Image (cartoon, rainbow, N blue to C red):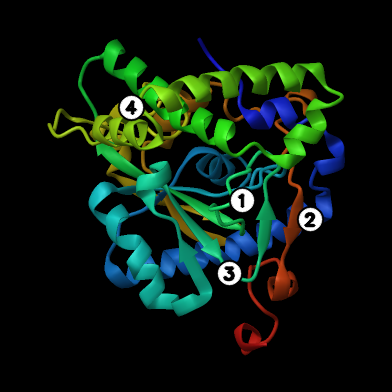
């Protein structure tokens, strides 16, 4: 059984769509954060690469995919486990970081901003503009379909449980008039109730954590917690060798074998942008940029003392 993403189901609600002006502002803030992240990695000698849609944006657009609203970064597990503390040491209270044990990736959040996703009802989750940072882990050599299936269901189980325990008020409002959305979330909350009874949130988090951290070195690496377990599996060189790529006028690291990486994720025609009707529209209940609304197209304040304004 495969599930559509919440983004794809809710993207038709254009009243929550980020307009071009907000997308542009968001890109400036994300670029600012990405430059901070890069500087921190260089200071501590951490290895990182742009991943997913951010890597695709670097290759195809030399910057953000015009309609994208996030940044994806990948790091070796050993650096991934240190970057949260390193960001705090570099920037003090400018950033907050989430506990990777809760969602199996790291969110680096920019304090003083708001990014409220309409599908999120968990009151403990911080709602700020964020970077997604994923760990690169060892992967089994074969397909290991049973392992992949266990990972898929455990990963979704804790998401279902959160939706069952903390339904979004925005989604509940939409469900009153939209049968498709109501049916979609009814199924997910039903499964969340079952998984909550048979195991619970912490149990499935531990299963995902255990399955992601494959101990043996097989010559394959991957990011199992990202798009999909098998689509995120690569020969080791793809996720260890990097090159500089232009992104919004700056150089950032991407996989040296980016064609192999992007083909595995998006297919051989990844250089062709999808038609407008097939683009995933990003929706958000509330976005606030705070003082970072003053950033220019380079992700910088016009004046040197901008951080202290």
Seen in the picture, residue 246 relative to 143 is either above or below; the reply is below
Q: Marks 3 and 1: which is nearer the front?
A: 3
Label 4 secondary element:
strand
Per the image, the residue denoted by label 2 is: 22
> Closer to us: mark 3 or mark 2?
3
Give the mark toward the camera: 1 or 2. 2
What's the CA distance linking mark 4 and mark 2? 34 Å
Disc 1 to disc 2, how far (Cα)?
16 Å
Mark 2 residue element: helix
Name the mark nearer the viewer: 1 or 4.
4
Residue appearing at x 30%, y 11% in the figure: 145
Q: Nearer the viewer, residue 96 or 21?
A: 96
Find out whether the residues at labels 3 and 1 contact each other: C-beta distance under 8 Å.
no
The mark lying in front, picked from 4 and 3, is 3
- Measured in 3D between alpha carbons, the distance from the residue under mark 1 to the one under mark 4, in whole angstroms, is 25 Å
Q: Are marks 1 and 4 in contact (CB under 8 Å)?
A: no
Residue count near mark 2 (Cα–Cα under 10 Å), binned few <14, some 14–19, many ≥20:
some
**Residue 283 appears left or right of 129:** right
The numbered mark, 3 or 1, whose residue comes first in the sequence reads 1
Residue 233 is labelled as 4
Residue appearing at x 36%, y 15% in the figure: 149
Sequence-wise, the earlier of marks 4 and 3 is: 3
Q: Which residue is mark 1?
A: 63
Marks 3 and 2 sit apart, C-alpha to C-alpha, by 18 Å
Mark 1 or mark 2: name the one nearer the start of the chain: 2
Within the image, what quadrant is residue 154 found in?
Answer: top left
- The residue pinned by badge 3 equals 111
Q: CA distance from mark 3 to mark 1?
A: 24 Å
Sequence-first tag of 4 and 2: 2
């Amino acid at each position: 059984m495969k599930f559509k993403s919440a983004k794809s189901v809710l993207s038709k609600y254009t009243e929550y769509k980020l307009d071009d002006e907000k997308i542009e502002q968001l890109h400036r803030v994300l670029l600012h954060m990405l430059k901070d992240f890069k500087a921190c990695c260089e200071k501590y000698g951490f290895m990182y690469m742009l991943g997913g849609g951010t890597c695709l944006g670097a290759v195809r657009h030399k910057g953000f995919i015009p309609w994208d609203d996030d940044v994806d970064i990948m790091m070796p597990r050993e650096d991934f486990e240190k970057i949260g503390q390193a960001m705090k040491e570099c920037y003090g209270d400018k950033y907050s970081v989430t506990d990777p044990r809760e969602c199996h990736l790291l969110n680096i959040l920019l304090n003083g901003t708001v990014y409220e996703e309409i599908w999120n009802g968990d009151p403990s989750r911080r709602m700020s503009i964020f970077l997604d940072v994923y760990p690169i882990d060892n992967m089994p050599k074969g397909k290991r379909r049973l392992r992949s299936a266990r990972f898929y269901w455990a990963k979704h189980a804790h998401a279902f449980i959160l939706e069952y325990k903390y339904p979004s008020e925005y989604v509940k409002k939409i469900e009153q008039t939209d049968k498709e959305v109501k049916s979609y979330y009814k199924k997910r909350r039903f499964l969340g109730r079952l998984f909550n009874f048979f195991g619970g949130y912490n149990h499935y988090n531990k299963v995902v954590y255990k399955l992601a951290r494959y101990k043996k070195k097989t010559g394959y690496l991957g990011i199992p917690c990202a798009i999909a377990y098998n689509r995120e599996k690569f020969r080791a060189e793809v996720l260890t060798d990097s090159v500089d790529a232009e992104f919004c006028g700056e150089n950032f690291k991407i996989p040296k074998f980016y064609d192999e990486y992007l083909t595995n994720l998006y297919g051989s025609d990844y250089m062709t942008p999808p038609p407008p009707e097939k683009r995933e529209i990003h929706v958000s209940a509330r976005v606030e940029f705070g003082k970072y609304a003053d950033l220019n197209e380079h992700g910088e304040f016009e004046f040197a003392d901008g951080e202290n304004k």
